[in-house]
Amino acid sequence: MLDINKIRKDFPILNRKVNGKPLVYFDNAATSQTPQQVIDVIVDYYSNYNANIHRGVHTLSQEATDKYEEARHTIQNHFNAKYAYEIILTSGTTESINLVAHGFASILEKGDEIIVSALEHHSNIVPWQMLCEKTGAILKVIPMTQEGELDMNTYSELLSDKTKLVFVNHISNALGTINPIESIIQQAHKLGAAVLIDGAQACPHVKPDVQALDVDFYVTSAHKICGPTGVGMLYGKEEWLTKLPPYQGGGEMIDQVSFEKTTYAGLPHKFEAGTPNICGGIAFGAALDYMNAIGFENIATYENELLAYGTKRLLEIEGLKIYGTSKNKTSVISFNLEGIHPYDVGTLLDKMGIAVRTGHHCAQPIMAFYNIPGTVRASFAFYNTKEEIDILVEGVKKAKMMLS
Amino acid sequence: MQSIKEIQEEIIDEFAMFEDWEERYQYMIDLGKDLPLIDDQYKTEDNIIKGCQSKVWVHAEMSDNRIDFTADSDAIITKGIIAILIRTFSNQHPKDILDANTDFIDAIGLKEHLSPTRANGLVSMIKQIKMYAIAYQTQIK
């Protein structure tokens, strides 16, 4: 059982007012809020040991390096990676995906095939399209069903010995569907294809075990898991990270440099050119500590309660349709009111202090599938309450009345 | 014929009567519902302004050295703001349109809708209105 009142006190932003009303923050799938424990770590870093890492002999540099590498270990433990150097700290999910796509440009050959899913975020479509343009590889798409689930029969048919890579999100950002990644990975591996899982939407709700999943690459962002923006990670199996060429040239990523030849540093530094987001990395570790102290099982149980309650209450509103009705989904409700544009609903909800996301959620192919311009998306976190859902329901009713 | 400035002041006065956001938005929603729709033949791909959030269509025609604008949107609040913009800019001389600004939108508490980051198509629509004014001005002898 979670002590929600105690948890809410950890988040100073939940006390603020928006347009004169107490904030109801239901845009957690876009970014989560930051607890005081993580804010304190950020303040402590800049107040006490801000320094560049991995090169200084002075005390501050040593302290900062230790904390940064400690954070890498925290992340390693959280995802159960075999080695700390399999955790590459990046600016976030998008950079992590681009890093892998860049690396595969030198591996793929013309006629090779890449499989993505119809449920992807644009950031998990565009890099692969660019990669295909560059290499002559072919992009195949796993279609989706009306419920917002992947059509796994077609996936099996798409796989062949030409398949080199499969990219699927763990959980869909637009609909909240939890994809059967275990089966996706196993089937791909049987044919020798590598699998990258985008965990940006999954990590706030579940604790992935990369070794148990046997996944080749797993990527996520800290800001969805109570951490700061601008930092994230790429987990890659050692064999893959060794095989991929460096992503960017610069300081930190080299071993020896001369004008004749440069040799690259070992993992993880080969992929971490330049001064990283040091404070962000440390705060990422602190955010995982915070969430683990609450416990992911507790979080999942509570969020499922919120999802069930929110679904039931919202469906009481006549003319409201929910998109993404899979039985396996996280606490995301994407909906529209019949005949009413999502932008109008979102605008009026904001006036009532309720933050939701409206639009296509960077997933235009999904919106095209349902033939809608977008949806209103309410996404719940473990610090939200049923009372807040009641406020949302009243807000949607009021918006409907004003707009009809 | 009222000048753009006079129309804008009139709108500011009208909005001053509303006591809260609900009245203001209800008025805009009603304006949006009443907005004469753009003629279907002009609701084309060419006339569309794509925002991330809502779409806007604009069409312009000139007669007697005055530009007549018609427009539409798929979102009603966006349409309400379009109605206000059309009321100020339509049936005006191209030069007056080019000289005018949209500061009055701040005064009626709708500033956020004209933010470039809002991506509802309105900022591009104003740019488009100005472009039409430049284009038509060159046709005036």
Image: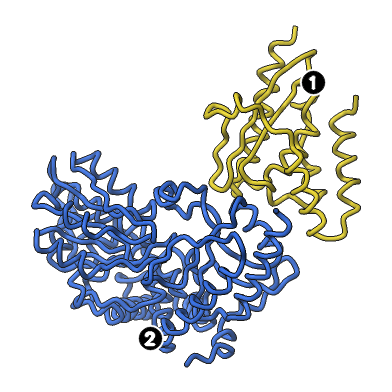
Nearer to me, A65 or B103 = B103
**Residue under label 2:** A297
Q: Which mark identifies residue B93?
A: 1
* Residue that protrudes farthest toward the top in the picture: B141
Q: Could you confirm whether marks 1 and 2 are on the same chain?
A: no
- Whole-percent x and y of residue A347? 66, 56
- Mark 1 or 2: in front is 2
Q: Mark 2: which amino acid?
A: Glu
Chain for disc number 2: A
Q: Residue at x 70, y 54 (%)?
A: A403
Q: Mark 1: which amino acid?
A: His
Instruction: Say which chain is blue.
Output: A
Q: Is the residue marked by circle 1 packed among few (<14), some (14-19), or many (20+) residues within 10 Å?
A: many
Nearer to me, A267 or B27 = B27
Q: Residue at x 60, y 24 (%)?
A: B41
- Whole-percent x and y of residue B59? 65, 26
Q: Which mark identifies residue A229?
A: none
Q: How many marks?
A: 2
Label 2's element? helix
Q: Please say whether residue A102 is visible from this viewpoint.
A: yes
Relative to A403, is A76 on the left or the right? left
Residue A380, above or below A302? above
Relative to A184, is A19 on the left or the right? right
Nearer to me, B82 or A45 = B82
- Whole-percent x and y of residue A114? 20, 50
